[in-house]
Amino acid sequence: MNTEPLATISDVEGAFRPLVGDESGQAAHLLVLASALVRGEFPRTDERLGTGDLDRDVVAHLVAGIVVRGLRNPDAARSRSETVGPFTTSATYADAVAQLSLLPAERRLLSVPSGLPPGLGTIRLTPGLAPPPGSRDHRRPRPWTRY
């Protein structure tokens, strides 16, 4: 199993800003975790990269984006509020696993194409939308109106 990160520190700096101090070490750690996350959800990533089915630049950009989100929010806080008046501070934290996650758009880019153009597929019908036969709405068709 390949454990090499799917992006580099320079990819993260290109998507974010030049890293300073301890941020490089933290970014390197997040790169390993984000790459493992991508490979865990899409096990054939390395194979698809090798065959050219998946663009390396796209994958590097996605992994760098995951790392940037982790660097911007190291505490994994979902929301923060601060009031200066009577000194109120509040924060809601996500679980530690949720700090690094793929967004739905990123999942779509990494998923295996189905061969259908985007937006085409199966239409699922929900039963119960049409009135049942024999109800008042299913009367005999009215004869054509003559003018």
Image: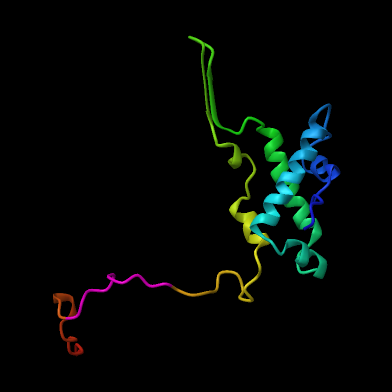
Instruction: Please provide percent x and percent y for residue 6.
Output: 79, 52
Q: Is residue 90 magenta?
A: no
Instruction: Please provide percent x and percent y for residue 68.
Output: 72, 40
Please state if 132 lies on the left or on the right of 86 as rendered: left
Q: Quadrant of the C terminus?
A: bottom left
Residue at 78% over, 62% down: 55
Q: Which residues are magenta?
A: 124-133
Residue closer to the observer: 131 or 10: 10
Residue at 74% over, 50% down: 35
How many numbered markers are drawn?
0
Residue at the right extreme? 10
Residue at 66% over, 55% down: 40
Judge whether 85 appears above or below 50 on screen. Answer: above
Q: What coloring was used for the rendering?
A: rainbow
Quarter residue 71 falls in: top right
Judge whether 122 appears above or below 40 on screen. Answer: below
Instruction: Please provide percent x and percent y for residue 63.
Output: 73, 49
Residue at 81% over, 70% down: 51
Quarter residue 19 falls in: top right
Residue at the top extreme? 86
Please state if 140 lies on the left or on the right of 84 as rendered: left
Query: Principal SS element in the magenta part?
Result: loop
Residue at the front extreme? 1
